[in-house]
Amino acid sequence: MGRPSRLGDKDRSDYGRALDEVIASPEIRLLLERSGVPGGRLRVRGLAAVARTTSAADAEYRRYAALRRRARGGRQDAGVSPLSGPGDQERPGAGVLAVLGVLTPVLAAVAAATFLLLGYGLRLAEALPALAGTLVGVGWFSLAVAAVTALVSVVALYRTAAKQSADGVASAPDHSPAVEDAREAWLAALRDRGIRPFLLQELAGAASAPGPEEGGGSRFSSPAFAGPDFSGPGFEGSAPPAPRPSAPRPPGPGRP
């Protein structure tokens, strides 16, 4: 059957809503009350097991994705990118170009200000006129570079925003009956064959796990301290010591 299909952003939102519906069902709510497991913790476990639960409804999801792609003219969903690892989210080099587009105008402007200040400072001081002229020329050139690169960055940013807006409008979900029926069939299979069995298994495991207080007895009780002859520190025992016999006193005068 192959690897299960990865969900896109919109499909993950549908998965979250389906998970909430199953958790809110009377069956799961009753088991939550009996087991004492918080509903938030169960939801986190369900979100973490998305690859396991969605594999049970992979056939329905493939059909839904194929109908949705066909309704959009065979194009891959532009606004629904698979949530994969690093390196799959954007083209290599796009981040470098964006950083250069931001840093180049800033660095050029800083260089222009530095060169112009030094050049005109030397001119005012009437020192090193050749160096002062060179610094002023380099400063004005850096200022021109800063202005041109800033203009190019603004135009590129505007074109990127316009393209993303157009792609978002073009990739709006198709509301044809066939696509909606396929989506509902996938969500039903996901709830019944994927999410609900997983949650029931999690709750059954939580109910069968021994509690921390099971086993009886006090948490401070110990056989070494429970004997009848135990006495606290500094005591010889529980019974008082026997009195020592007194020595006979010698007879004195007037005593028999």
Image (cartoon, helix red, strand yellow):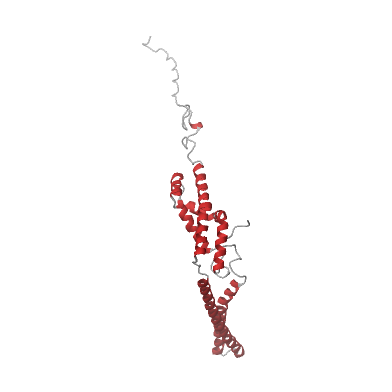
Q: Is residue 4 above or below residue 157?
A: above
User: Which residue is most to the front?
Assistant: 177
Residue 154 horizontal/vertical position (percent): 53, 79
User: Which residue is most to the right?
Assistant: 2
89 left or right, relative to 14:
right
User: 64 or 82, which lies in front?
Assistant: 64
Residue 88 horizontal/vertical position (percent): 60, 66
How many numbered discs? 0
Q: Is residue 118 visible?
A: no
Q: Is residue 223 visible?
A: yes
User: 248 or 236, which lies in front?
Assistant: 236
Residue, x 59% and y 75% (percent of image)?
97
User: Which residue is most to the left?
Assistant: 254
92 left or right, relative to 162:
right
Residue 104 horizontal/vertical position (percent): 57, 78
Residue, x 49% and y 55% (percent of image)?
19
Q: Quadrant of the N terminus?
A: bottom right
Q: Is residue 60 above or below residue 216?
A: below
User: 218 or 186, which lies in front?
Assistant: 186
User: 205 or 10, which lies in front?
Assistant: 10
Q: Quadrant of the C terminus?
A: top left
Residue 53 horizontal/vertical position (percent): 55, 54
Q: Tell me which corner region of the image, top left, top right, bottom left or bottom right, holds residue 78.
A: bottom right
